[in-house]
Image: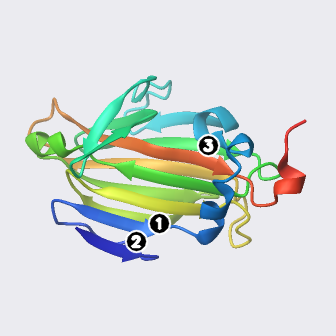
Amino acid sequence: MAKFNLVPLVCLSSLCFISSTGASVQAQRGYPELSAFLLDGANCRTSTSHGNSNYNNIKVEEGMEVIVGRILYPTPFLLFAWRENYISLACDINTEQFDVLQLQLGVADDEVQRDSLMTVNIYQGGTIVQTYGGIEAGAVIDTTVDLSNADVSRPGSVSIELECLSTRSSSISCRLFALEAQLFPTTIGSSQKP
């Protein structure tokens, strides 16, 4: 298993671990009552290249599990896109309440049967801030999005985009599983809910 720190990269092996996590998120995990699951703590919508934007290309189900890199993970949701299409999950996050979005995204080991090849883009304020290309079965993307990023006009506007480059046939979709999608405050005192 290859491990990469702070550098989005093209992942062409059957198993990769891509990381850009920050120490601040690790410190906040001691305060789970202040964190929130992305789809609960933000206003999110999907859009697709084929124009259907009503969550038809996202599956949210309690108790879902997936095997990625020979490890069983719980998964709160999955995104899927048909060959030569994309899906984008765009979220408007309250930056007065949350400062960090921790994402861990994975491609199921059984995706190898689909012969899927995909690219994952992370947007912030409408600009691509991270790209992971050539993603295949068994890959894990572990990244942190700084919601106080002064380099973008709307740092709380974050999108996860899955581009399905190829699959075994046109009737097969690429699937990207959320292994973690958690919002964390970095200023504990000012971020508590009443």
Seen at 21% across and 49% down, the residue is 70
**On screen, residue 71 above or below 153:** above
State how far apart marks 2 and 3 are (Cα): 21 Å
State how far apart marks 1 and 3 are (Cα): 16 Å
State the image coordinates of residue 145 (x, y, percent, origin top left): 59, 61
State how far apart marks 2 and 1 are (Cα): 6 Å
Q: Which mark is residue 130?
A: 1
Tell me the amino acid under the disc marked 2: Pro
Dividing the picture into quadrants, the one containing residue 150 is bottom right
Residue at image mark 3: 91
Dividing the picture into quadrants, the one containing residue 148 is bottom right
Seen at 60% across and 38% down, the residue is 37
State the image coordinates of residue 163 (x, y, percent, origin top left): 33, 49
Q: Residues within 10 Å of mark 2 (few under 14, many from 20)?
A: some
Residue at image mark 2: 8
Sequence-first disc among 2 and 3: 2
Does the CB distance between marks 2 and 1 fall below 8 Å?
Answer: yes
Residue at disc 3, secondary structure: strand
**On screen, residue 192 above or below 149:** above
Q: Is residue 96 left or right of residue 143?
A: right
Quadrant of the drawing holding the C terminus: top right
